[in-house]
Image (cartoon, rainbow, N blue to C red):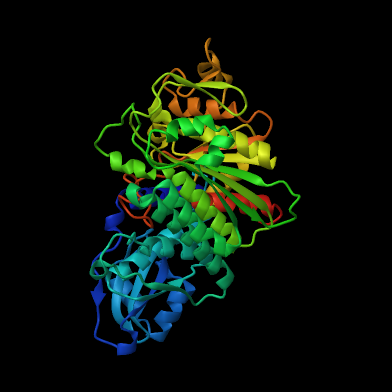
Amino acid sequence: MNKMGRFQSSLKTASRVLCNPRALFTDPVRFTCADSKAKMRGVVVGLYQKEGNKDPRLTPAGQTIDNRVKGKLMKAICETKLDGRLGRGKVFHNLDPEFAAVAVVGVGLEGIGFNELEMLDEGMEFVRVAAGVGARALQEQGVTQVLVDGMDYAEQAAEGSQLAVWRFTDNLAKKNMPSIPTLDLHDSADHEGWTRGIFKAEAQNLARRLSDAPANCMTPTMFAQNAVDALCPCGITVEVRTMDWIEAQRMNAFLMIAKGSCEPPVLLELSYCGTAPDDKPILFVGKGITFNSGALNLRPCKGMEEYRGSMSAAACCVAMMRCIAALSLPINVTCIIPLCENMPSGMSAKPGDVVTLLNGKSMAVRDLDKAGVVVLSDAILYGQKTYLPRLAVDIATLNTGVKKAFGGGATGIFSNSHYIWKQFQRAGSISGDRVWRLPLWHYYKRQVTDERSFDLSNNGRGLATSCLAAAILHELVPCVDWAHLDTRGTGLISKYGLVPYLTKQRMTGRPTRTLVQFVYQMACPDMK
């Protein structure tokens, strides 16, 4: 089969897997009981897809197990007609004396790599899928220790398996707690890659936990406490700015949204110093609206609980900082996170109110449902003035335009720098959590600035809501390389096109690993 044929076959297989993740594993096959010491241990091994006249082939780790059991594993694979298609597999019980269960999962075609049409390293992503599906299948069988075959990509195997077995347990009674197995690398020497993958997956799981918490359990103050608990042990400086400080800085736009709620606003400043203190940092700004009801422009009640995740971008920033500290990346990074609630009350801003930003421009808040750009505006201006960054990146769940365009397939990115866009594109192709560029044209700028009685509006005119929001933010960063990531489709509850190693109807924690990969590329540009 030629190279393009391989890609097309893999794309079709991946499409079927993503559309029907529950059908990935068929019923387990049980054999006679083996050594009782192995009853709670399981292993995940890969199976390469049948290609042409070649039969499906186990990975080297799988072949080692097959040799140890004198060919019984391969015989069972043939009898159950496994063909190595991505994510399809079976669990075999008590086949090997060392393991109570062996999960054999299809990894797709052997030797597949970067797919330019998909802008995805399919070799890496397929390993994430296989490891995640296998680890979850063993978890559901009650296995408490899961060993995972590296399948030539130990880092990605760690990511997929760790993300797959994680569960949100904060509000469960002890008797209802799910079993979370421990994970270890099996039959591979790449322990460094495995550790990196665990760090990245644990960071995304932290973002998932923060985003998924009910709004009454993750107020601005509680989020700040969680950030302190997560980051201070890693050597990251955390400054918690309260109402008095915010008022003294005259962050009027931030306060305009925050005053509608009884919960006091908080602004977090996170600083990681991985190189000389004089080096300019990368500035990240994460939207931290811990519950976005739409205020007086109230959102529909059905599904409103999802908007507890309007601070998912802030959660990603906290998780990213924890991961880059764990990886000891040689770079300086600063995060600004404005935290507040957007609620209706007698103190709420009214549609049409005008506020003056830190740069002296006036903004009309005509739609309080679109409070994200209002909250971000002063934080972006403050960060640029205070830290003089080498580049700025803001992350937010802003508008439905990007969600309608991409669904959960990609995060929308807007940038005034082709270099920054290319770095994010590469980071997404490696992490498997892709981004895609959208236009930042004067056409949209005119729709948010062409007003007679104020300088900017928070909603603009027209239907391209995500492009208009990016145009507003672009007005606040005139002299620095900048990118805006709109995660409205990827950062909230996963509903459609589920990624097999994530959990349906839960917050995703995306795009944490893409942010970490981007920072890694900026810190180590010579590393491939």
Q: Position of residue 244 (x, y in %)?
A: 53, 40
Would you say 412 lies left or right of 301 here?
Answer: right
* Residue 366: % across, % down: 42, 21
Q: Nearer the viewer, residue 219 or 5?
A: 219
Q: Is residue 160 left or right of residue 343?
A: right
Q: Quadrant of residue 48?
A: bottom left
Residue drawn at the location 42% of the way across and 18% of the way down = 352
Residue at 51% across, 57% down: 228
Q: Residue at x 25, y 81 (%)?
A: 31
Q: In the figure, residue 47 lies in which quadrant? A: bottom left
- From where the camera sits, is residue 194 visible? yes
Residue that extends furthest to the top in the rendered view of this protein: 452
Q: Quadrant of the C terminus?
A: bottom right
Front-most of 233 and 332? 233
Q: Is residue 153 visible?
A: no
Find residue 118 and report its horizontal and vertical position in percent: 49, 44
Residue 134 in the image: state x and y as whole percent. Answer: 36, 66
